[in-house]
Amino acid sequence: MALPVVAIIGRPNVGKSSLFNALAGEMISIVEPTAGVTRDRVSTIIEHNDRYFELVDTGGYGIVDSDQLKEHIENQIKQALELADLVIFTVDIRDGLMPLDEQIARLLRKNNLNVILVANKADEAKMFPSAAEFSKLGFGHAFCVSAANNLNQQVLVEKIIEMLKDHISEKPRDVEMKIAIVGKRNAGKSTFTNAIVGADRVIVSEIPGTTRDSVDIRFEKDGKTFIVIDTAGVRKKSSAVKNSIEFYSYVRAAKSVQQADVVLLLIDAAEPVSQVDKKLAGLIAEEYKACILVVNKWDLAKGNASSDDYADYLGKTLPQLSYAPIAFTTATESRNIQSALDLARELYKQATTKVSTPRLNKAIEQTFSQRPGGKRGSVQFPKIYYATQVAIKPVTLLLFVNKTELFDENYKRFLIGRLRDSLGIAEVPIRLLVRPRRREKTDGSADRPVRRGFNKGRSQR
């Protein structure tokens, strides 16, 4: 059952995003003095004394947007109001009553919505009397808060819970999987997100940089709950980050990669693989994330290249993600979107695989039977005494070895390639940790049981 929805509404720069973050208890929405930073609906789940509601941050109503997105922003606000069970109408106590506040008040009365009028930026109690003029808006006395100083934040949450007492507020279902969608500007991330969710949940525009924040969207599929994260497009490193908005947009995109279970790296089929694509591929590989290379706008691919040829091209240009499967999509037509989602679920299954210790050691023994370790003459080779899995997401294997320095990156790649195939996890990253085997003590005891090598007999030739 859907949670009650609480939408924060107000004109630009009244501190809606600051209030949203304060109520959420973490930095979710970008907060910046520039008007119009928030464009899409940003939401999160709030819990208080076993009661839950979805809190939604919206763009500034009446914003004069430099990118000509005013209509799109107000459409997102309209959708938020249609879904809202309660509205937090936010005004600025420092600015006082403004004509745009009165315009918003008329809109809320027209829609017959339940409203809490909140006067933000009331940093000190002596400012509270100034909120009296907002009574003219027709929603009673304004409740004074300071999002910046956390003043009356908890009291506001309790007031929200009280006004939602007639709404069922069950604990939301556990999230099955988090999917982050990343890519360079105009790769089609927002269109792809809307296609997955099945609704116009985020703004789609030809203007580069339309999405500025990372937007978490919960949706249901086959009785399961998922979160898809639409992220801001990343610029070339050589292009200077012009302002703090772009800086925070990139930081949020990188954080979304870290938090995701599966990352979808969108590649624009109409353009050559760029430095931004390579930069993001490197970030995904460094985080050991399960990943799908989503070749979007496949209908616009130049020269009508075959999928096999394009896969070879990606293998050469993005070798750090050689394990990642490839999906060819056209998000504007919702083509192959469901297949990509199904593939993401399969990768999540692989990334959460738990391999029994006997099975893992048998796989390693089979690998060494093809490439023996140990020592021949004066030359020493890598040798594994024992292995065990210590984590998932990524699958992390701990190896006890003869000498850690023998297990360089090339040798690790060899092992990982063999283990992926033999363990049935060929499309996700594996992290290898190597530790030296502890030696027996002089009194005959040992720090831990010492395993005999798989190559005993072979290595002593």
Image: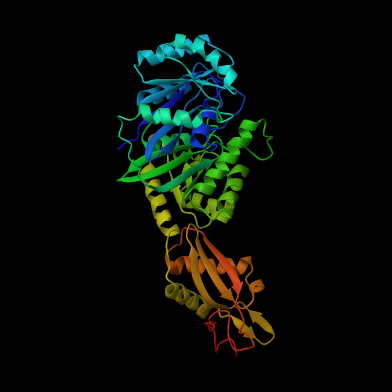
Viewer-side residue, 398 vs 2: 2
Left or right: 248 with respect to 308? right
Place of residue 257 in the rendered image (x, y in percent of width and height, measured from the top left): 53, 46
Q: From this view, report whether residue 18 is shown above or below residue 230.
A: above
Q: Can residue 142 be seen here?
A: yes
Viewer-side residue, 350 vs 397: 397
Place of residue 65 in the rendered image (x, y in percent of width and height, measured from the top left): 55, 19
Q: Residue furthest front?
A: 126
Viewer-side residue, 441 vs 267: 441
Q: Can residue 267 be seen here?
A: no
Q: From this view, report whether residue 57 is shown above or below residue 224.
A: above
- Quadrant (top left, top right, bottom left, bottom right) of the C terminus: bottom right
Place of residue 278 in the rendered image (x, y in percent of width and height, measured from the top left): 60, 47
- Quadrant (top left, top right, bottom left, bottom right) of the N terminus: top left
Q: From this view, report whether residue 434 is shown above or below residue 219.
A: below
Residue at figure coordinates x 44%, y 41% from the top left: 228
Left or right: 94 with respect to 110? right
Residue at figure coordinates x 49%, y 12% from the top left: 134
